[in-house]
Image (cartoon, rainbow, N blue to C red):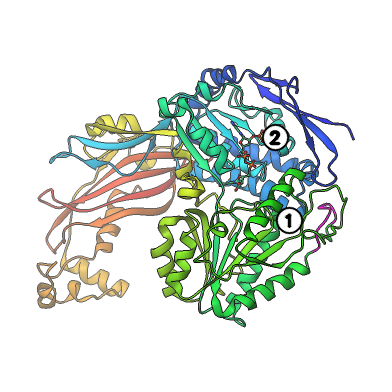
Amino acid sequence: MTVQNVSSFAMGQWIAPGAGARPIASAIDGKIIAQSGNDALNVGDMMTYAREVGGPALQKLTFHDRARMLKALAQELNKHKDALYDLSYLTGANLRDHAFDIDGGIGTMFVYASKGRREMPDSHVYMDGPPEQLSRNGTFLGQHVCTPLQGVALHINAFNFPLWGMLEKVAPTLLAGVPAIVKPATATSYVAELGVRIMIHSGILPDGALQLISGGVGDAMENLTCQDVLSFTGSAYTARKLRGHAAILDNAVRFVAEQDSLNASILGPDAVPGTPEFDLFVKEAHREMTTKAGQKCTAIRRMIVPESHAQAVADALSAKLAATPVGDPRDTANRMGALVSADQKQDVLERAEILATEATRVFGDPDGFTPNGDPNGAYISPMLFLCENPDAAQRVHDTEAFGPVSTIMPYRDVDHAMELANRGGGSLVTSVITHDGDVARKAVMSAGAWHGRIYLNDRNSMAESTGHGAPMPHMIHGGPGRAGGGEEMGGVRGVKHYMQRTAIQGSPDMITAVTGRWQPGAAESTAGAHPFTRRFHELQIGETLHTAPRTITLEDIEHFAHFTGDTFYAHMDEDAAKRNPFFPGRVAHGYLLLSFAAGMFVQPDEGPVLANTGLDALRFMQPVSAGDVIKVRLTVKHKTPRNDEYGEIRWHVTLTNQEGALVAEYELLTMVAC
Ligand code: NAP
């Protein structure tokens, strides 16, 4: 087999390995398959290139442009999935594992592409939360906005998920408008390199938006500024070294760390043997031990179970592990592949030895183990430990054996279970398998502060649940303390890690000008023609229609009540309505007012308005009685293109009475032809 040169991609050029290159062995037979690294790589220059070329090019695009770019990249990666699978086998991963790393990585990119289009504006400034009224008359407002950092994101990744680990960071970074430099772990860098090659060769990305370091990071750390982000995934040991670097401390560089974690899974006291929850617990525990041969940052390291069922869990899980063939990941008969390298295997064996000082091994003998694969491959037997006295133990709570190794710990009651879960010192995820809502609530109250994610599963959700160990792009991934104190993904939250949040204060006109969203109190305009006769691109932010007035009569209220069946007493019975603290007497239905409003502002002829798709933030502020006169104001608040045919117009609508007092306010959504 030829040795693959794992190149870097720097300043638009592919740079092959050179002086200082390190050999990389295959996980499945120990043979050298690749080399990576080049001491001559100038990472400082790459960072300057990213800031000066990639950043400005990305920042010219809107969030929607960048979201479309992510979708195109994900489609391109999808086309080359088989090539990625083929390389990935050499890391010890099997087809099931590819679903997490390769499909999961591409899927994450698709989710960001979709969220960028649905939840972010087609402009350059992201509004973070609603405007704040800072003055009595509304002439001075506050608004938090996010704009892209003007630096570079340096992503240093762990070996276990070479594709997912890269894409889950690259997607929110590019969506934010920030260029990325990716440094994969050397052991599996050949998979990440192929991923980058596919993305670069697609021609979808602007120059300088994505670069790749294969090998060491050179002078990267010294070159970090306050506009950069260092996002690290790996061991606590490396995280500590990076976190303490002078440039990080001196320049207050954003540093996100996702590190190792002693994740737990708790079997609820109700989940006794014979219940669907007991079987579910064993199934998930088995999956977490064997997927990626246990090399998952989220894998279950500690199983916290009622003391009366500890032996039953040990027996059921041992039986499943015994029926799990381990060997060559390309052979689908094998359910578990190899660790990434012989070094990793050695590391796992050493840590299992540490666990053995406080716990008894109840499954898996590393010495008497024969895999269904090359003897030089990094295969290892799954190992299950039982720690009878987890209160007195320490190493079972702080030793991460990054392989198919887990420890069962008995608990007395739910408080004790949570106490044990929290002894991991902060984790990425804890699961609670229970059908009892009280147990779930107690778990969240006493363990929420210690864990980035709490995964609750039972008979009702098990068929569709996403798995203890699978971080979802919609939800945050990260955890306190031992887990690194970082946070990634979580939908748009993850994009904000690469943007600066700034508090903008000014008049409604200024806030409208900055954000592209009309604010009440800002200037209104009129085009002369009715806005419903104007196409998407013709409508202007702030364009307003004021309707003629309409008087509400008792007949209107009666008619609406009988027509709809809404004969609630406040609309029908004067005395009863008067006894209600909210009403002066019989009042008009809120929905009657909305319906009248539509009748007052609509332009009925066939025209560019295609459909009413919803209504947001509806508030009724004042009751309307028979004899009151209402008027409607309709203003273009925001425009979101959807496709070549139509876009969404968000209208700000107010209803006022004869005294000019606000009686109702809402945002109306319509699709309008382009
Ligand atoms: P690692 O040894 O800490 O390496 C992680 C990354 O840091 C690699 O890219 C490595 O590059 C790089 N690195 C090492 N020393 C460095 C330095 N002085 N300066 C700059 N970069 C440096 O961790 P690993 O063995 O790859 O990964 C396994 C660990 O990661 C496990 O403990 C696991 O729990 C954790 N992990 C956590 C998460 C999470 O999301 N929380 C996810 C996956 C893994 P080289 O490979 O070139 O040395």
Disc 2 packing (10 Å; few <14; some 14–19; many ≥20): many
* Label 1 CB less than 8 angstroms from ligand 1: no
Residue nearest the viewer, comparing 592 with 282: 282
Residue nearest the viewer, comparing 502 with 554: 502
Q: Is residue 466 visible?
A: no
Label 1 residue SS: helix
Mark 1 vs mark 2: in front: 2
Residue 447 left/right relative to 519 = right
- Above-or-below relation of 537 to 20: below
Identify the residue at image location x=53%, y=64%: 431
Kind of residue sitting beneath label 1: Arg
Residues drawn in magenta? 325-331
Which numbered disc flags the more N-terminal residue, 1 or 2? 1
Kind of residue sitting beneath label 2: Thr
Disc 1 packing (10 Å; few <14; some 14–19; many ≥20): some
Q: Is residue 27 visible?
A: yes
* Label 2 CB less than 8 angstroms from ligand 1: yes
Assign the N terminus to one quadrant of the image: top right
Residue 282: in magenta span:
no
Identify the residue at image location x=19%, y=34%: 140
Residue nearest the viewer, comparing 353 with 68: 353
Which percent across, then down, holds residue 494? 48, 42
Identify the residue at image location x=41%, y=25%: 250
Label 2 residue SS: helix
Q: Which residue is mark 2?
A: 186
Q: Which residue is mark 1?
A: 96
Q: Splitting the image into 4 quarters, where does residue 220 fall?
A: top right
Residue 545 left/right relative to 256 = left
Which percent across, then down, holds residue 430? 52, 61
